[in-house]
Image (cartoon, grey):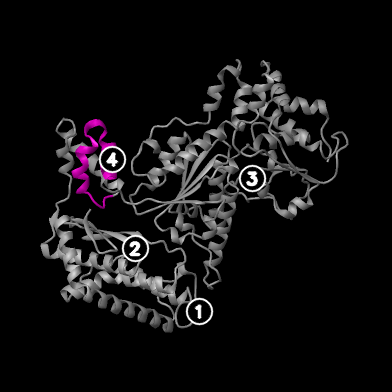
Amino acid sequence: MQFADKVARFKRISKDPAVFLAASALLRAAYSVSPLRFGFSGFLVFVVPPGYNTAPYEAAATDILNIKRDEWSADWVNKDPRVRLANPPKVKGTPHRPASIFDLKGLDILIAQDLSEVPRDVRFAATAVLQVEPPTVGQINGARRLWSRTPFSEEFASSLARQPHNVILAAVLKPTAAESKIEELDAINRIETTGPSLFDLPGYAEVMPWAKDLARDVERWRKKALDWKLVRSGVLISGPPGTGKTLFASALATALEMRVVSATLGEWQSAGALDDMLAAMRATFNSVNDGKGAILFVDEFDAIGTRLARPSGHQGDQYWQVVVDDFLKLVSTIGDGVIFVGATNYPQWIDPAILRDGRVDNHFTLSLPDTVTRAQILRHHVGDALSVESLMDLADELDGRSGAQLDRLVRDAQRAARNEDRELQLGDLEAQLPAMLDYTAEQQLRFAVHEVGHAVSSLALKHSFSANIEVRRRFDPEADDAFGGRTIYDLVPDHVPTETSLLNRIAIAVSGMAAEQAVFGDRSLGSGGTSGSDLEFATGLARKLVGSYGLGTTPIFIAAAKDVGDRPLPQALEDEAMQILRDQYEGALSMMTAERERILSVASDVMAHGTIRIERSGEAKAA
């Protein structure tokens, strides 16, 4: 490889400040291999600084090698094989040519945005793999002088060299003194936000401490006081629909003054076949890896899937293996300043390797808001029209509503007020309440008996220290999951579950149904019929005991616990799991029958007060 004559080379690269800075950096890196006047055989791999655009380096390399190029067109890229990008952008209708050991003929310089773009065999074949450094103080001031600009002070130029690529070029090109505009330079890559900031929104108590720590680290990173590798910036947000997972991403972006880039697996798949889908996924990651900082939000994150521990023989196994492997690589090499946010309703479906430390290592579950949080959410949407205190009774009537549903309720109330040409009033919100029905006294007693059964069993089996029991008096007939009662436990820590403690969990789960049978001689639908029900939990745990944990009659492992529970096991193990359920239900029924009078007494207290707390000692108190 021979470099072009110095004078001719300088004339070409001095036409564009970006190309001049890129060429200076390439020549500085190459000089460590051989004095430039002699040249050398083979090819060089240059890895540009993190977040830097490869285009100026590609143009600089062609000028250094005296390759003719049309500055208005990129056609020279296809005509001359001496300079290439390791992972060129994919152009529809033309073959994609990433770096390959089988396609190196005529290559002199390979430009890579990240070392991972260069296959290991290509690295081995190269004369040298060189990491290109950001512009030096001298190079920055050299560019200023070339364009008749006043050079910067060494201190300012030194701090400028640590800024993102676009900020350096903006400062170099500014005709007037940039040093007095340092605050404007710091703000170049901060977006002008219009949406709400996460720190102003109610309903995110679970994730707020992490987000505030992240905001402090982002500021340190922007001031070059913190290496991005020390920032724990990957997060998974899970929870039921409507709990604000999508809003979280945009509100976090607003709080951090960053842009947000959203994607879903479905969008990537719509690009076409596997290669097209992978290219679309890589393009999304590349779009945020510019060193400026961004939120990369991937919704329906569980759709990425999970790799099988062993092949099943299905045709799609290899497809998803490749997808997950490529996704792992992209997440592991994500650029500086990029905060990855995944959202899902089903965190258990995500490959564990994606969630390990160093990738997406923070996980927060957003729950449906409680009464106080519902009032705060309503207050946020109504503005100054109403106080939180005035909204508490209304919020209490909206149990089980998500943040998204509360937002819609307020918008409907505001529309009604606008139509009458007046300000919003509390009555407008109350008018949006669903038509509630009252539970009968018999129904309330059944709910109370059911929940007391769970609590008595949990305390007797030393699964909890205390239990709070609540019964509802009214319900929304249109709600999908209106509950009649619930029990919240102060649990005894069980960090190393045993066979006995796991069997006790099954017994507690079926004790509500057993209490109904013991008291009324009849059972309701309250223990089953829905995902997350008592019976789903009990059935799944029984299957895990015999098919994954090895705690059945025969110690055997069929599959990981996450893959066992929601479908039948081989018949012998399925029979054993069903026997466990029968045994635990019979034990729970025996306990509930013996405690029948106590259960009725505590259930009466629940009906009288709505909510009570019972201790392991047996004492019951109004909550």
Sooner in the amino-acid sequence: mark 3 or mark 2: 3
Left or right of 476? Residue 337 is right
User: What label does residue 556 carry, if any?
Assistant: 1
Q: In this rendering, which labeled residue sits more in front, label 4 or label 3?
A: 4
- Establish if 490 lies above or below 179: below
Q: Position of residue 377 (x, y in %)?
A: 29, 41
CA–CA distance in space, label 1 to label 4: 51 Å
Sooner in the amino-acid sequence: mark 1 or mark 2: 2
Sooner in the amino-acid sequence: mark 1 or mark 3: 3
Q: Residue at x 17, y 71 (%)?
A: 597
Q: Secondary structure at mark 4?
A: helix
Q: Residue at x 61, y 45 (%)?
A: 89
CA–CA distance in space, label 3 to label 2: 60 Å
Q: Position of residue 222 (x, y in %)?
A: 56, 32
Left or right of 431? Residue 581 is right
Q: Amino acid at mark 3?
A: Pro
10 Å crowding of disc 3: few (<14), some (14-19), many (20+): some
User: What label does residue 88 carry, if any?
Assistant: 3
**Which quadrant does the N terminus fall into?**
top right
Q: Residue at x 38, y 35 (%)?
A: 195
Residue at the far right in the pictured view: 38
User: What label does residue 376 carry, if any?
Assistant: 4
By secondary structure, the bulk of the magenta-drawn segment is best described as helix
Q: Amino acid at mark 2?
A: Ser
